[in-house]
Image (tube, coloured by chain):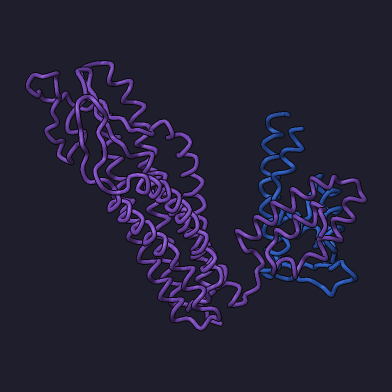
C-alpha cells in the first residue's frame, strides 16, 4: 500500500518522457507502458495534459496520425531534459540506497 | 445529443483543445474501457483534465484572438465575483450594536479615536460606557478596514467598468450597440432602483393622525401603492444586481476590445484580486475578534460589540475564500494572457 502511494507521487512528465524515449507511441501505448514500468495508471485527461505541456515546451512532437491514433516522439530537447532529471534521480537513489545500507535495513 | 458521460466530459474542454485532441482521446478511452477501466473513473479524470485545460490553458495555440478572449474572460473572473460577494459581505458586517452589562449604549457607533460613548441608565443621567475588550476593538477596526476596502474596490471597479464601456464604443466589433447595452446593465439597474425609490417616497403618507389609543392613520399619499413599490424595489434591486453581473460577463466574453484596453482590464483585475484578499484577511480577523471578545468580556466590565448577521460569519468566510481563490486565479490568468496578447496579432 505504501509503495503504491509512493508510486503515485512520481513526476508524470518524467514518466511520459521515459516512455517515449523507447520510441514513438500513441496515447494508449504510453498509458500501458507507464503502467508496466511504474505501476502508475494514467487517465486520458492526465496524459493529454502532460503531452500538451511537453509539446508546448518542445520536448515531444506529434507524428502524422494513424487513423484516430496519433503517435508522439521525444525531441532532442526532451531527451536532454530527461537525461538531466534521471541523472539527478539516480544520484538521490544512490545516496539513499547507500544510507539504507549503513542502517542494515 | 448523447448522454454518454465521457462525451459530456469531453465537451467541458475548451474548443481549441477539442479540435486538437478529441479524436485521440476518444480512441484512448475506447481502448481503456475495453481493458476494463471503469467509465466513471475515465470521466472523472477527463473532467479534471478539462478544468486544468480551461484554467491553465496549457497547450493553447499562440493565436492572438484566442488569447484575447481568454484575457477578457480572466478579467471578468477576477472582478465579477466581488460584485456578487460585496453586498453580501456588507450585509453580514452591518447592523452594529454596542452593549454593556448595564444596558444599551448610545450612540451605537464608535469613532476612530474611541469616541465618547454614553451609557443610558434608566432615567438617570448618562454615564460613560466601559471600554471595549481588546478583541472587540480588533473586530471593530477590522470592520472599518473592510468598509474602506469595499469603497476602494468599488472605486477601482467603477473605473474598470467605465473603461470597459468606453472600450466597447471604440471597438469595431459587430453588434456593438447591443454589447454596449449589456455593459450598461448595472447603470440601468441602479437607475431603476432610484426611480422606484423616489416614487415610493413621493407616494408615502407625509403625516399621521393620532387619536386616543388608536393606531395612527396615514394622511394623504397612497400607502398601499407605496408598500407595493417597496416590495418591487427589493425584487428589482436583487434581480437587477444579478442580471447586471450576467450581462457584463456576456459583454466581456464577446467584446473584442483593443490590447490597450485589455491591459487596463488586467491592471484592474490585479488590484481587485489584491483588495479582495485583504478583505478576506480583515473579514477573518473580524469574526475571530468577535469570538474571542465573548470570552474576554466575562472577565470584567466591558462594552461588547455585535452585528445583526454575525452568525453568518463561517458560511460567508467559506464563500469569500472561494471568491478570493477565483479572483486570484482570474488575475493570474489575465496577467499570463496579457503577455501573449502584448506580442500582437
Relative to the observer, which residue lies in front, B237 or A80?
B237
Residue A86 visible in the current orientation? no
Compared to residue A91, the image places residue B339 above or below, namely below
The blue-tinted chain is A
Instruction: Point out residue B186 in the picture as x, y percentages from the top left corner.
Output: 42, 62
Residue at position x 33%, y 45% in the image = B223
Residue B342's place in the image compared with B270, above or below, is below
Who's purple, chain-wise? B
Q: Determine whether, in the image, residue B34 is placed left or right of residue B283.
A: right
In the rendered image, residue B314, in percent from the top left (x then y), is placed at 46, 34
> What is the tally of numbered marks visible in this picture?
0
Residue B19 appears in view: yes
Quadrant location of the C terminus of chain B in the rendered image: bottom right
Residue closest to the far top: B299
- Nearest the viewer among B311 and B125 is B125
Quadrant in which the N terminus of chain B is drawn: bottom right
- Considering only vertical position in the picture, is B326 above or below B61? above
Left or right: where B234 falls relative to B41: left
- The image position of residue A57, as x and y in percent, is 66, 68
Expressed as whole percent of the image width and height from the top left, the position of residue B343 reads 52, 79
Residue toward you, A59 or B262: B262
Residue B187 placement: quadrant: bottom left
Q: Residue at x 47, y 49 (%)?
A: B324
**Farthest residue toward the left?**
B125
Amino acid at each position: 500500500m505504501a509503495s503504491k502511494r509512493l508510486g503515485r507521487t512520481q513526476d508524470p512528465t518524467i514518466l511520459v518522457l521515459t516512455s517515449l524515449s523507447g520510441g514513438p507511441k500513441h496515447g494508449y501505448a504510453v498509458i500501458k507502458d507507464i503502467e508496466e514500468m511504474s505501476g502508475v495508471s494514467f487517465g486520458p485527461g492526465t496524459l493529454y495534459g502532460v503531452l500538451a505541456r511537453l509539446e508546448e515546451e518542445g520536448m515531444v512532437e506529434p507524428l502524422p496520425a494513424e487513423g484516430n491514433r496519433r503517435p508522439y516522439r521525444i525531441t532532442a530537447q526532451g531527451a536532454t531534459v530527461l537525461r538531466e532529471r534521471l541523472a539527478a534521480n539516480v544520484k538521490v537513489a544512490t545516496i539513499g540506497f547507500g544510507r539504507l545500507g549503513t542502517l542494515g535495513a | 445529443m448523447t448522454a454518454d458521460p465521457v462525451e459530456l466530459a469531453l465537451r467541458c474542454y475548451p474548443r481549441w483543445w477539442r479540435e486538437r485532441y478529441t479524436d485521440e482521446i476518444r480512441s484512448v478511452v475506447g481502448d481503456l474501457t475495453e481493458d476494463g477501466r471503469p467509465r466513471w473513473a475515465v470521466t472523472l479524470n477527463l473532467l479534471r483534465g478539462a478544468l486544468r485545460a480551461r484554467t491553465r490553458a496549457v497547450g493553447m495555440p499562440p493565436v492572438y484572438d484566442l488569447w484575447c478572449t481568454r484575457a477578457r474572460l480572466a478579467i471578468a473572473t477576477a472582478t465579477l465575483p466581488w460584485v456578487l460577494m460585496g453586498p453580501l459581505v456588507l450585509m453580514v458586517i452591518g447592523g452594529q450594536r454596542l452593549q454593556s452589562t448595564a444596558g444599551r449604549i448610545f450612540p451605537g457607533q464608535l469613532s476612530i479615536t474611541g469616541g465618547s460613548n454614553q451609557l443610558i441608565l434608566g432615567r438617570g443621567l448618562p454615564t460613560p460606557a466601559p471600554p471595549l475588550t481588546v478583541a472587540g476593538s480588533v473586530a471593530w477596526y477590522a470592520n472599518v478596514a473592510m468598509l474602506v476596502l469595499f469603497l476602494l474596490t468599488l472605486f477601482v471597479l467603477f473605473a474598470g467598468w467605465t473603461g470597459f464601456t468606453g472600450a466597447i464604443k471604440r471597438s469595431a466589433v459587430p453588434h456593438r450597440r447591443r454589447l454596449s447595452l449589456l455593459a450598461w446593465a448595472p447603470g440601468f439597474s441602479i437607475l431603476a432602483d432610484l426611480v422606484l425609490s423616489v416614487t415610493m417616497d413621493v407616494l408615502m403618507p407625509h403625516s399621521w393622525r393620532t387619536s386616543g389609543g388608536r393606531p395612527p392613520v396615514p394622511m394623504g399619499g397612497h400607502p398601499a401603492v407605496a408598500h407595493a413599490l417597496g416590495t418591487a424595489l427589493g425584487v428589482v434591486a436583487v434581480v437587477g444586481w444579478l442580471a447586471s453581473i450576467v450581462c457584463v460577463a456576456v459583454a466581456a466574453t464577446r467584446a473584442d476590445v483593443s490590447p490597450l484596453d485589455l491591459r487596463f482590464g488586467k491592471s484592474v483585475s490585479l488590484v481587485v484580486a489584491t483588495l479582495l484578499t485583504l478583505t478576506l484577511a480583515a473579514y477573518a480577523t473580524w469574526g475571530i475578534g468577535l469570538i474571542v471578545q465573548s470570552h474576554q468580556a466575562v472577565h470584567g466590565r466591558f462594552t461588547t460589540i455585535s452585528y445583526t448577521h454575525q452568525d453568518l460569519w463561517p458560511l460567508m468566510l467559506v464563500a469569500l475564500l472561494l471568491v478570493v481563490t477565483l479572483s486570484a486565479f482570474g488575475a493570474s490568468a489575465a496577467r499570463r494572457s496579457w503577455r501573449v496578447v502584448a506580442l500582437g496579432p
